[in-house]
Image (cartoon, grey):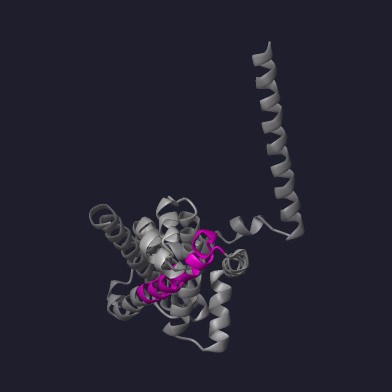
Amino acid sequence: MKLKQTIHENLFKQLSLIFVIVILFLMAGSVIDADWTEVSENHRQAVVFLEGFLRPEWGYINQLIVPMIETILMSVSGTFLGVIFAIPAAFLGTYIVTRNYFITYLFRTFFSLIRTIPNLLLAALFVAIIGIGELTGVLTIAVFTFGMVSQLIFANIETIDEGPIEADESIGATRFQIAVNSVWPQVAQSVYAYALYAFEVNVRASVVLGYVGAGGIGVMLNTALSFMQFGRVSLIIIIILILVAITNWISEYIRREVI
């Protein structure tokens, strides 16, 4: 009897949740005045897109080599800068290292603020400050990487064995010496893994950043879409997919064989 009652209660909860989700969906559609008939009415445009998309403009590939290299270099540079600054900042954001609640709170608040800023907004801000170009993309990726990796590192530090730290403290070691000798050896491999993960994410993100003028192959994709050159769009997407696949394979190989 209890089993049936439990099943009925769970079923009621699930149906109630589905009902609430459907209501919220309908309300959201009503508020934004979504006209779903446009999907069927614009089927001709979809046909035009598919006709061009299924015929990649292979002759355009030579013009994509430089933007593709720029995208990779942006990702590498931005990831490197972000990780380099994230490591000391994450250490300062951990009480185990600083033994100072104020400094820890200050840095963690800063991390939280950085992570709340979307990539595209960061890119738009840097475009307004610096202008359109690859430097904007590098700085955007660096700030994003800093926020993400610093969070991962200080969360990892909080789980380490404090025995070596207490041993160093007992002999009068400085906070810097403790960080280098007792903390870093325990988190180093994780930091390398976080850096590789950030690089994978940044390669994909750098494509989107091109839409706001942050350089790379994303600019070419935005231009091709603006002029409805769907054959070029198809080729660019193929190149991006290959680039992302190669990046993921290299990262996985390094994690498996090196780290």
| Quadrant of res 242 | bottom left
Number of numbered markers: 0
Q: Which of 78 and 48 is in front in this view?
A: 78
Q: Which residue ends up furthest to the front in the rendered image? A: 171
Counting from the top left corner in percent of width and height, residue 110 is at 60, 70
Q: Which of 111 and 252 is in front in this view?
A: 111
Counting from the top left corner in percent of width and height, residue 224 is at 44, 76
Q: Which residue ends up furthest to the top in the rendered image? A: 1
7 vs 167, left or right, is: right
Q: Which residue is drawn at 57% across and 70% down?
A: 114
Q: Residue at x 56, y 76 (%)?
A: 122
Asked whether 76 falls inside the magenta stretch, the response is: yes
Q: Nearer the viewer, residue 57 or 135?
A: 135
Counting from the top left corner in percent of width and height, residue 47 is at 48, 61
Residue 76: in sight, yes or no? yes
Residue 191: in sight, yes or no? no
Asked whether 17 falls inside the magenta stretch, the response is: no
| Quadrant of res 54 | bottom left
Position of the N terminus, as image quadrant, is top right
The answer to whether residue 117 is above or below residue 35 is below
The answer to whether residue 24 is above or below residue 114 is above
| Quadrant of res 258 | bottom left
What residue range appears in magenta?
A: 75-99
The answer to whether residue 244 is above or below residue 132 is above
By secondary structure, the bulk of the magenta-drawn segment is best described as helix
Position of the C terminus, as image quadrant, is bottom left
Q: Which residue ends up furthest to the bottom in the rendered image? A: 130
Q: Residue at x 72, y 34 (%)?
A: 16
Counting from the top left corner in percent of width and height, residue 157 is at 46, 56
